[in-house]
Structure formats: C-alpha cells, structure tokens
Image: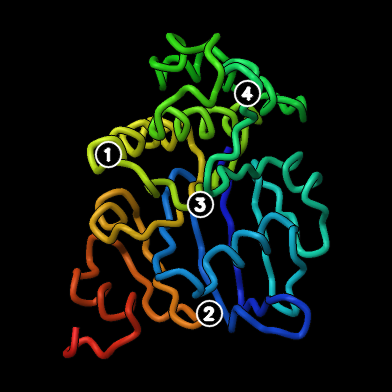
Amino acid sequence: MASSLRIENLFAGYGAVRILHDVSLHVASSRTACLLGTNGNGKSTLIKAIMGIIRPMSGKIVATIDGREHDLVGMSTEAIVDLGIALVPEGRRLFPSLSVEENLRMGSFSGRRGPWALEKVYDVFPILRDKRGAPSHSLSGGQQQMAAIGRALMANPRLLMCDEISLGLAPTVAKDVYAALRRVRAEGLATIIVEQDIELARTMSDRAYCFTHGRVSLAGRSSELTRAQISAAYFGVPEHAA
C-alpha cells in the first residue's frame, strides 16, 4: 500500500541553537526526494528529526505507512524503525567484525514482515551474494554502500532514507548504486536521499530540495529545475551570479 512522508513548518536544532527554519517538504510513494546543499546547512539535522534522534522545536512530521497516518514527533527511534522507516547512515557504519551476511541479517531485528529477505537483497546486489561470507571491512566502498542499503532493506521499510549515498565513491560506482535503488523504489518505497552531486540528484530523483542556512531555498520537480537554479540555491548566491 502507498506510503509517504509530509513535513510542515519544521523548526529543529540542538539545545537552544536552531538549525532548521520553517522547513516543509513531501515525498510520495514510489518517489524519490533529494536533499541538496553543502555541509552544515541542515540536511542531516532533518534526517535526525525524522528518525526521532532529535525532537523538533515545532512543526509536523507525518508519515503515512500503508494507508495509516502517524505523527512521528515525540516517537522513539525504535518505534519509528518498527513503523517502517529505515536509514542508511552516512559512512555506512557496518559492523567490521561481522560478515556481509551477518551485517545484512542485523537489519531484520525488528521482525517487520515484507518482501525483503536475503535472496531478494542478493538479487538486487549480486556481488553481495558472492561476498556473503567475507568480513565487511574487506569490501570496496561501493560494495559497503550496497551492504548498508541491503541491511536497511532487510527491515522491510516503507520509507528509505540514504544519507550521503555517493560520498567517497567513484562516479561509475555511484551510478551503479543508484541504478539498484531504482529497482528498490519500484517496490513502492518512498525514498529520501541526501546528495551533494547535483547531476546525480537531478537524474535520480523526482523532487529536489536545496538547503541554505537551514531553510529550503529551492524546491521543485528535479526534471524542471535547471543546473543554474540548483547551483545558485546550493551555494546561496543569486541565480544571475551563479
């Protein structure tokens, strides 16, 4: 069933320090929203607010999971994961002492039912089947990113978030990872990706949101936003100066 995420007028930060200012966005079922912007502009803060790691100062975060609405504000991270929201963290954060398959199985600890099991993950990422018994630290950067995505899928989420998915990857490897994500999205998942590569963001997402100083400085259909518009919003300069 359809799942989506709606954020309205969100203010969030750390202690008395406000990082996000009046942020609103929406990601629909089987659609990908991309969060763009340089480091320090609030993208990771937004991810933490969605996951319940920090509590917003005000505003709404509403997830519709399989047709039912859930207010995420005030929910624990564990409850949010159980609801069907999974995060692929920046830096992958695999367990280095565990094998690839053991890392993947860690994603199923919630016991949430759904289509994603080991064989389906291996179908999407065949290299992980070949490496299933290898220690995760022996994988290349791209393979580690695939394992991190696979681990998140093992939780059978309805909303998947990927933080800095192409960071440290060669362009061809990043494109391979995104190609696999297209297959994942076809399963009906709503997807949010944090990305710094403007071209990847434009070609791999349905909607783009640029963040500048904790605010959404540009939003729209990725196919309709020009590189000049995105670059101007990305760097926080007037478009004619981009």
Among numbered discs 3 and 1, the one appearing first in the sequence: 3
Say whether disc 2 or disc 1 marks the residue closer to the N-terminus.
1
Q: Position of residue 49 (x, y in %)?
A: 68, 64
| Pointer 1 local density, CA inside 10 Å: few below 14, some 14–19, many at least 20 | some
Q: Nearer the viewer, residue 237 or 167?
A: 167
Between disc 2 and disc 3, whose residue precedes? 3
* Dot 2 and dot 1 residues touching (CB under 8 Å): no
Secondary structure beneath dot 2 equals loop
Tell me what residue is drawn at x 27 percent, y 52 percent: 200
| 175 vs 185, nearest the viewer | 175
Q: CA distance from mark 3 to mark 1?
A: 16 Å
N-terminal of the pair, mark 2 or mark 4, is: 4
Q: Are marks 2 and 3 in contact (CB under 8 Å)?
A: no
Q: Is residue 181 above or below residue 240?
A: above
Label 4: state its secondary structure: helix
Reading the image, the residue beneath label 4 is 103
Q: Position of residue 46 (x, y in %)?
A: 60, 66
Q: Is residue 100 above or below residue 168?
A: above
Q: Is residue 208 left or right of residue 240?
A: right
- Marks 4,3: beta carbons within 8 A: no
Q: Is residue 74 left or right of residue 90?
A: right
* Circle 3: residue type: Asp
Q: Is residue 105 left or right of residue 30?
A: right
Q: Which mark is residue 214?
A: 2
Residue 42 lies, with reference to residue 181, above or below; the image says below
Mark drawn on residue 163: 3
Q: Amino acid at mark 2?
A: Gly
